[in-house]
Image: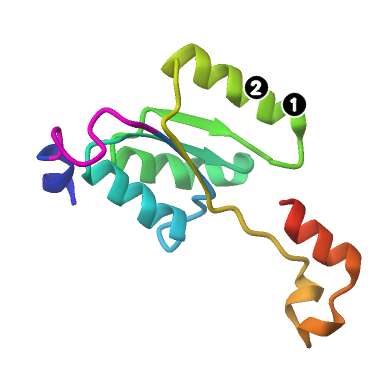
């Protein structure tokens, strides 16, 4: 992958600034998207939900030379605002955002879908 990233200066996404939210580990769909964006020349920024994810996501960011990382819990409007301001200050513009954040209450993941409560369903949609 490193060779593809190094050779991608004039790729499909050359010089595009793409923020990818939802990288949790090397098995995340968001991680695969981040790798492809970087391989095609994008400047990639990654978000992490909380400090428990910081070290893991930092290592992945290093693999694709992602220089912008930001804490983002999408349930906290102040964090969204802070990240937006940081993007404005550091990048000036954002060419694309990938939202690959997923959440469901553990109880909602077991049993039948039809038994999911309205509150559990609304939480999953909100996030």
Residue at which label 1 appears: 78
Q: Give the range drawn in magenta.
A: 8-17
Direction from residue 115 to residue 44 in the image, left or right: left
Q: Is residue 23 above or below residue 72?
A: below
Q: In this view, does 35 lie above or below 121?
A: above
Q: Residue at x 37, y 46 (%)?
A: 60
Residue at which label 2 appears: 82
Question: Residue 64's spot in the image, x, y percent?
Answer: 29, 41
Q: What element carries label 2?
A: helix
The quadrant where residue 43 appears: top left
Question: Residue 121's spot in the image, x, y percent?
Answer: 81, 66
Label 1: few (<14), some or many (≥20) within 10 Å? few
Label 2: few (<14), some or many (≥20) within 10 Å? some
Q: Which residue lies furthest to the top in this view?
A: 89
Question: Residue 105's spot in the image, x, y percent?
Answer: 78, 66
Label total for image = 2
34 or 10: nearer the viewer: 10
Task: Please report contact status of discs 1 and 2: CB closer than 8 Å, yes or no.
Answer: yes
């Amino acid at each position: 992958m490193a060779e593809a990233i190094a050779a991608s200066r004039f790729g499909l996404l050359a010089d595009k600034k793409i923020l990818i939210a939802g990288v949790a580990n090397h098995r995340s769909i968001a991680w695969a998207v981040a790798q492809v964006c970087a391989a095609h020349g994008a400047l990639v920024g990654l978000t992490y939900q909380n400090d428990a994810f910081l070290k893991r996501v930092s290592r992945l960011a290093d693999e694709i030379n992602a220089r912008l990382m930001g804490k983002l819990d999408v349930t906290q409007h102040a964090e969204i605002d802070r990240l937006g301001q940081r993007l404005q200050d550091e990048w000036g513009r954002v060419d694309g955002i990938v939202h690959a954040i997923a959440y469901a209450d553990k109880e909602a993941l077991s049993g039948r879908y039809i038994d999911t409560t309205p509150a559990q369903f609304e939480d999953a949609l909100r996030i």
